[in-house]
Image: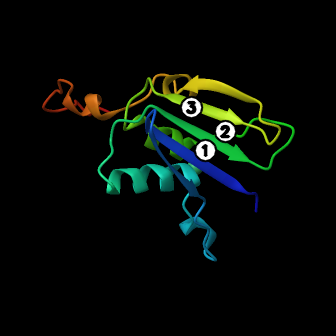
Amino acid sequence: HHFWQVSVCFSIHTSLVSCNVENACYNLGICAERTAISKAVSEGYRDFKAIAIASDLCEQFISPCGGCRQFMREFGATWDVYLSKPDGSYVEMTVEELLPGSFGPDDLKMKQVHSIPNEY
Ligand SMILES: [Zn+2]
């Protein structure tokens, strides 16, 4: 297992740190990104400015899994995501850049048809 740490930032002065919550039953583990966001939401924060993701991988910038990208999208598409390496280098992206053409909360309010013809 790799070391993985995430910090989520709500304002210049407020942020919190999280980690992966791994489980002997592997698929029940929770990524550090979702842990950080859930921890923040449970403390009453929903407007995020940035999330910084760090790990022990040396040769590439760490990147959130698909599930975490969607989870982040729930809180907006334009906030910043910092992907880092142990040497302190990083790249800055937005949630939208990590998950283009995404599905989010606003899509639930879109106009719908009452029935979809099923002729096949
Ligand atoms: Zn993840």
Mark nearer the N terminus (1 vs 3)? 1
Image side of residue 117 versus residue 33, left or right: left
From the viewer's perspective, is 111 left or right of 34?
left
Disc 1 from disc 3: Cα separation: 13 Å
Disc 3 secondary structure class: strand
Local secondary structure at mark 2? loop
Label 3: which residue? 81
Q: Residue at point 47% right, 39% down? A: 9
Nearer the observer, 108 or 71: 71
Instruction: Report the mark closest to the observer, 1 or 3.
Output: 3
| Label 1 within 8 A of ligand 1 by Cβ | yes
Measured from the top left, where is residue 93 in percent x and y?
59, 24
Q: Which one is nearer the viewer's eye here, 38 or 106?
A: 38
Query: How is this picture coloured?
Result: rainbow
Q: Nearer the viewer, mark 2 or mark 3?
A: 3
Residue at the spot of label 2: 63
Label 2 residue near ligand 1, CB within 8 Å: no
Badge 3 crowding class, 10 Å Cα cut-off, few under 14, some 14 to 19, many 20 or more, is many
Residue at the (71%, 36%) spot, across then down: 84
User: Which residue matches tag 1?
Assistant: 65
* Quadrant holding the C terminus: top left
For disc 2, the neighbor class at 10 Å (few under 14, some 14 to 19, many from 20) is some
What is the tally of numbered marks visible in this picture?
A: 3
* Disc 2 versus disc 1: nearer the observer: 2
Q: Examine the rendered structure and indicate whether residue 15 appears above or below residue 47.
A: below
